[in-house]
Image (tube, rainbow, N blue to C red):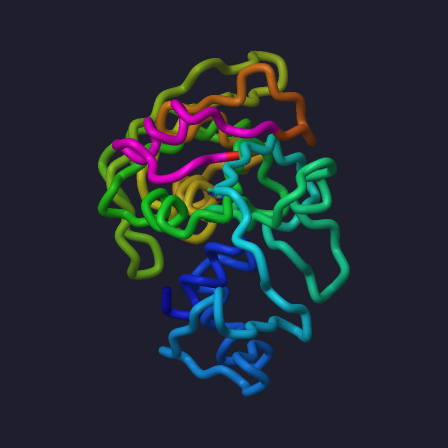
Amino acid sequence: MQERLQKLLSGFGVASRREAERLIEAGVVKVNGKVATLGMRADPETDRIEVDGRRIEKRPPLTYVMLNKPRGYVTTTEDERGRRTVTDLLEGLNHRVYPVGRLDMNTEGLLLLTNDGAFAQRLTHPKFEVEKEYRANVTGDAEAAVKLFRKGMLIDGETFAPARARVLKTDPTTGVSTISVIIHEGKNRQVRRMCETAGLEVRRLKRVAEGPLTLTGLAPGKWRLLTEEEVSLLMGKKIRGKIQ
Ligand code: URA
């Protein structure tokens, strides 16, 4: 069956749809020996599809991974500057997956990766409002900051929707507070920018939950497959087809 090339490539775990569009625009995707163009459709059963000279052949099973990302890893599948990437941590996984959304290099915690384009779209689209909970260790007036977070913020002309936020504890000796911030958007460096604007210095930032999923039992640097039930919960419906 013919499919749009970027959809097809994300289904084969090559890259997210947006990233696949970039690959097509960069001219590294070929269909039947010819450089592909955006908007093109192809059939993996009958067409010869290549990315960077490598042939894309068998559609892998739908694969959904939860990783506990440590600091110092870039959220991408390949880094042109040779830095360590989150996919370096997926030892033992037999299928290519790509990250759903992004955690900054120095942010740690729950990161999902998949080869299911529809799943990735659903989780990253603001209209689905999947909640993400972050824990931040900060210095500064945390109580005043969480009040600002709850009202919503305008930062560099960009609107940040009201967050659910509270101070969990403050260490009286160091003055470091741990705050919980729950947002449903995925704007670039969102929590760090909210903290900076509210006058907080972020010492550490970790995503601890996404929708119904938490990191419980998963050590930093480790990954596990999601269960079928977890995938259905995130999708808000039964998933199509078999999962790994
Ligand atoms: N907010 C940030 O500031 N950084 C992340 O990595 C995720 C959310």
Residue 217: where, in percent of width, then height?
Answer: 59, 15
| 115 displayed left or right of 222 | left
Q: Quadrant of the N terminus?
A: bottom left
Residue occupying the far right of the picture = 82
Residue occupying the far front of the picture = 46
Relative to 236, is 188 above or below? below
Q: Nearer the viewer, residue 231 or 193?
A: 231
For the record, the magenta segment spans 224-243
Magenta span includes 229: yes
Residue occupying the far bottom of the picture = 34
Q: Nearer the viewer, residue 5 or 17?
A: 5
Residue at 56% across / 14% down in the picture?
171
Quadrant of the rendered image containing residue 163: top left
| 230 displayed left or right of 22 | left
Q: Nearer the viewer, residue 78 or 42?
A: 42
Q: Nearer the viewer, residue 111 or 26?
A: 26
> How many discs appear?
0
| 92 displayed left or right of 24 | right
Residue 104: where, in percent of width, then height?
Answer: 56, 47
Residue at 40% across / 43% down in the picture?
194
Quadrant of the rendered image containing residue 218: top right
